[in-house]
Image: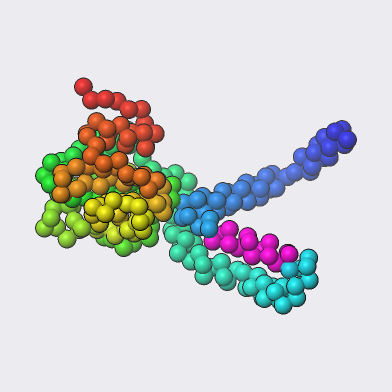
Amino acid sequence: MLTNILDNLQFIFQQLRPRDLIDMLLVWVVVYRVLILIRHTGTVQMLSGLGILAIAYLMSIWFELFTFNWILEKFFNNLFLIVVILFQGEIRRALAHIGSNPFFTGASHVQETHIVEEIAKGAIQLAQKGMGALMVIEKEINLEYFIELGTEIDSVVSAEIMNSIFLPAGPLHDGAVIVRGGRIWAAGCFLPLSKNPALDKNLGTRHRAAIGLTEETDAFVIVVSEENNSVGIVEGGQMIADVDHATLRRVLYESYGLKYRPQP
């Protein structure tokens, strides 16, 4: 049996032409990009729903549920159009992303270190001045929807720019800053408020927005309270309140996958 399998594999490889290898490579690239799109846009739930309907369709054939089968058959006959409608935003953003930078994103190791230091310094400075702020660091799940609700900036990350954005008299101070790929991508972005009834009633809108976003995405959020001049870090729907500069730096280094270097 094993000999036959090896002989068949050898025959297949002998028949492969260079164009066949190119063909398989292109298919692999397309599948890879689709999987990345699904992961980055959080569309797994909708795909799961389509999978459940596909299983229901097979079951309707098996158990001869003719009316139910007829409805599902009409649905799947128009599946391509339905997918385009459901994922039109994701498809548009994916095509734009491929056109601008098909494979490589993000910042270098040196840039990431600089970003960590500037974000930590900016957050502490804002807390010391009694200025509220929300700083969002995009990770795997795409935050394009929230970016589109704000004002595009596309600026380098620096403590000074963070301080200017969150000046109480500024037009963008009420929203959040979103950092993507090592740059401040947008400001004045509005985030979803957490609906968790177990949250402390004394938490303000900024804290509820920080928790709400991290409940829906894998973003890392820094929230600066103007009431008590403190800095909090939020990830996975959980908040650590009143952190100092050293703790903030350490957590940021860990979030970026960098080796933590205590300041002298």
Locate residue 56 relative to residue 209 in the image: left or right.
Answer: right
Above-or-below relation of 70 to 252: below
Image quarter hosting the C terminus: top left
Q: 17 or 30: nearer the eye?
A: 30
Say which residue appears at 36% left-offset and 40% top-offset: 107
Above-or-below relation of 72 to 259: below
Image quarter hosting the N terminus: top right
Say which residue appears at 73% left-offset and 64% top-offset: 58
Residue 224, horizontal then vertical, whole percent: 21, 46
Locate residue 120 relative to residue 98 in the image: left or right.
Answer: left
Q: 38 or 175: nearer the eye?
A: 175
Residue 172, horizontal then vertical, whole percent: 20, 58
Locate residue 55 relative to residue 38 in the image: left or right.
Answer: right
| Chosen colour scheme | rainbow
49 in the magenta segment: yes
Q: Is residue 111 visible in the rendered structure shown here?
A: no
Picture mark count: 0
Q: Main secondary structure of the magenta part?
A: helix
Magenta-highlighted residues? 46-59
